[in-house]
Image: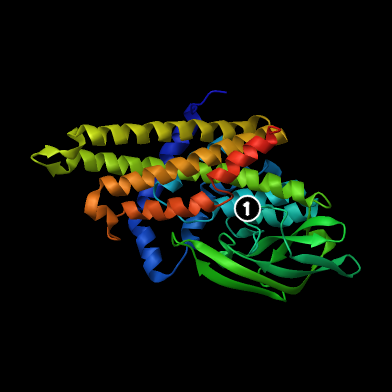
């Protein structure tokens, strides 16, 4: 597998960079944090018009099906400026769940609306004591009549849950693990918006007898395998965003080393800081290879379950460690100003801490990689 971008992907990268610089600089992240807004529906619609929300969705449902490597390029540029719009939640987590597990009617109803930016979908799977386990859930789905289910339970840390129109909810049904597509305003559904450390949208979701039809069930009785697949795809997108963020933080730090003067010379001339910067460069490039590899695998052989899952764990473990290291070192090499909220470098550290714990930290994924290999 070639770990380089083709000409079309390079063109897309530049277009994404230009868009982000013009429409969502870091100053916008600060403004959203101050106003309590999590995102902009206007910018979301502009992303939809650019075709970004349909890059992994088939043409029959309004997408372009260009693949994960193309979306990876976009996500890296969004990550560079910490753009908060819910592409991972909707274009990857939600879209994958519906594409792989939904009926023809369900796909026709939701996927085109998601591609156009008219619908935001969030995955509600995590519970208070589940940690990173996908199967450790207490939420239930009980028969409520002919081809209907009643959902009860509570979901925490629902990524982009505060702005979602629909939720993909996990529950235990009498016939096994189940996923359901549930409207955010369904009767019995309570959504309590929350803000994460990085200022992005999250939510606490409670379901008190929410009634859904059998048609809203995704994946039938293979719900757990579908969820594993959805999380793998979402993680591949998240690490692309993490790569963009750590690359931008490293670039910001290099610029500081070149321009900050001490003893009448740039501090970047000090050998100890050169060694630290070189280490960050190595970590970033290793992460880049892992990210390109996993997204390439999804495009080339998306059904190779165990192989893709191992590649996902390699990428997430590497990016979690690398992003945290880059963020910490960047703050330290900026000195006293790096510790203040006024400097943008701190925004990357906050984002690194959230990303580290999303979909499993590095220790979890190293252990998962070993288990998938039979150890």
- Asked if residue 88 shows in the view, the reply is yes
Quarter of the image with the N terminus in it: top right
Q: x, y (%) of residue 276?
A: 30, 36
* Front residue of 254 and 103: 254
Q: Residues within 10 Å of mark 1 (few under 14, many from 20)?
A: some
Residue 373: quarter of image: top right
Q: How is the image coloured?
A: rainbow
Q: Residue at the far left: name it.
A: 264
Q: In the image, is residue 66 above or below residue 122? A: above
Q: Nearer the viewer, residue 350 or 65?
A: 350
Left or right placement of residue 359 versus residue 339 in this view: right
Residue 197, percent from left and from top? 45, 61
Q: Residue furthest front?
A: 375
Toward the right, the furthest residue is 146
The quadrant holding residue 298 is top right
The quadrant the C terminus occupies is top right
Position of 329 compared to 129: left or right?
A: left
Residue at the location (53% across, 23% down)? Answer: 2
| Left or right relative to 266: residue 299 | right
Q: How many numbered discs, if any? A: 1
Q: Position of residue 17 (x, y in %)?
A: 40, 43
Which element is circle 1 on?
loop
Q: Residue at x 58, y 73 (%)?
A: 192
Q: Which residue is mark 1?
A: 132
| In the depicted structure, whether residue 164 falls above or below residue 355 | below
- Asked if residue 67 can be seen in this view, the reply is no
- Above or below, 29 against 19 in this view is below
Give the residue at x 40% y 48%.
20
Q: Residue at x 74, y 52 (%)?
A: 107
Residue 191, given in percent of the width and then of the height, sits at 61, 72
């Amino acid at each position: 597998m070639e770990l380089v971008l083709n000409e079309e992907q390079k063109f897309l990268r530049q277009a994404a960079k230009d868009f982000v610089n013009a429409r969502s600089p870091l100053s916008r992240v600060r403004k959203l944090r101050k106003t309590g807004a999590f995102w902009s529906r206007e910018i979301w619609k502009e992303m939809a018009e650019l075709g970004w929300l349909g890059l992994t969705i088939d043409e029959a449902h309004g997408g372009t099906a260009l693949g994960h490597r193309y979306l990876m390029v976009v996500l890296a540029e969004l990550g560079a400026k910490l753009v908060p719009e819910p592409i991972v939640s909707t274009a990857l987590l939600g879209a994958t769940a519906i594409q792989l597990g939904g009926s023809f009617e369900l796909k026709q109803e939701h996927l085109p609306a998601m591609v156009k930016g008219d619908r935001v979908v969030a995955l509600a799977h995590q519970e208070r004591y589940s940690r990173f386990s996908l199967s450790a859930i207490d939420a239930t789905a009980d028969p409520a009549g002919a081809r209907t289910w009643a959902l009860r339970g509570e979901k925490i840390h629902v990524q982009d849950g505060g702005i979602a129109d629909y939720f993909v909810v996990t529950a235990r049904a009498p016939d096994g693990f189940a996923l359901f597509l549930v409207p955010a305003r369904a009767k019995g559904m309570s959504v309590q918006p929350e803000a994460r450390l990085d200022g992005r949208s999250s939510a606490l979701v409670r379901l008190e007898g929410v009634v859904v039809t059998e048609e809203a069930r995704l994946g039938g009785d293979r719900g757990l395998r579908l969820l594993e697949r959805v999380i793998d795809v979402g993680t591949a997108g998240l690490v692309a965003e993490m790569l963009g963020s750590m690359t931008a933080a490293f670039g910001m730090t290099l610029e500081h080393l070149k321009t900050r003067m001490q003893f009448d010379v740039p501090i970047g001339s000090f050998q100890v800081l050169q060694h630290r910067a070189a280490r960050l460069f190595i970590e970033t490039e290793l992460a880049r290879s892992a990210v390109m590899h996993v997204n390439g695998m999804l495009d080339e052989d998306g059904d190779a379950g165990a192989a893709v899952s191992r590649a996902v764990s390699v990428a997430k473990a590497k990016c979690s460690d690398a992003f945290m290291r880059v963020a910490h070192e960047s703050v330290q090499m900026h000195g006293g100003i790096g510790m203040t909220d006024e400097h943008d470098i701190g925004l990357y550290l906050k984002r690194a801490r959230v990303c580290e714990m999303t979909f499993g930290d590095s220790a979890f994924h190293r252990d998962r990689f070993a288990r998938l290999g039979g150890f």
